[in-house]
Image (tube, grey):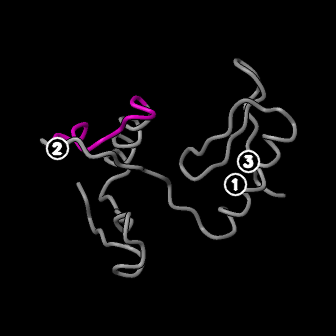
């Protein structure tokens, strides 16, 4: 169940793309269910996966504070530089893994 939602960005600022939407869920389980659906579908997640009749692609991302967003960008660069295979977010935590079955490393600081 959704507690609150609103659009971000200025109206008409990006003509070819709709403005993003911030959603706050009442329960963490609802948020987790949506994120799990997104994870299952990877590249083709759309409105039909949410039970709607349309098939419009949607993009779902975790909301990060500015400092966590910068840390995630740095981790993304490290992934590229050091040849790590996986980098992902789970419950606001930044996680990295070098190869399949390898140790999961939590990135907390620079």
Q: Nearer the viewer, residue 47 or 96?
A: 47
Residue most extreme to the right: 82
Residue 69 place in picture, x, y as percent: 65, 62
The residue lying at 73 percent from left, 29 percent from top is 85
Q: The residue tagged with tag 3: helix, strand or loop?
A: helix
Disc 2 secondary structure class:
loop
- The image quarter containing residue 34 is top left
**For the residues carrying marks 1 and 2, which lies nearer the camera in this image?**
2
Count neighbours of disc 3 (C-alpha within 10 A) and say few if under 14, some if 14 to 19, many if 20 or more.
some
In the rendered image, residue 10, in percent from the top left (x then y), is placed at 40, 81
Q: Nearer the viewer, residue 4 or 79?
A: 79
Task: Tell me the quarter of the image containing the C terminus.
Answer: bottom right
| Residue that label 1 marks | 72
The outermost residue toward the front is 16
**Alpha-carbon span between mark 1 and mark 2:** 33 Å
Residue 22 visible? The answer is no
Of the image marks 3 and 2, the number of the one nearer the N terminus: 2
Instruction: Give the left or right position of residue 43, taking residue 80 as reference.
Output: left
Tag of residue 76: 3
Q: Between residues 63 and 8, which one lies in front from this camera angle? A: 8
Q: Is residue 94 visible?
A: yes
| Residue 51 falls inside the magenta stretch | yes
State the predominant SS element of the stretch in magenta. helix
Are the two marked residues, 1 and 3, in contact with CB atoms closer than 8 angstroms? yes
Please give left or right for residue 100 compared with residue 6 in the image.
right
Q: Residue 80 shows which numbered tag? A: none
* Disc 2 target residue: 54
Total marks shown come to 3
In this picture, which residue range is highlighted in magenta?
A: 40-52
Query: Mark 1 or mark 2: which comes first in sequence?
Result: 2
């Amino acid at each position: 169940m959704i507690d609150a939602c609103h659009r971000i960005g200025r109206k008409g600022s990006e003509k070819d793309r709709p403005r993003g939407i911030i959603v706050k869920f009442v329960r963490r389980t609802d948020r987790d269910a949506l994120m799990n659906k997104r994870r299952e579908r990877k590249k083709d997640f759309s409105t039909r996966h949410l039970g709607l009749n349309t098939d419009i692609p949607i993009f779902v991302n975790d909301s990060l504070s500015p400092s966590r967003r910068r840390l995630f960008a740095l981790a993304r660069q490290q992934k590229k530089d050091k040849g790590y295979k996986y980098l992902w977010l789970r419950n606001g935590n930044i996680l990295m893994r070098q190869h399949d079955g390898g140790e999961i490393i939590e990135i907390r600081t620079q």
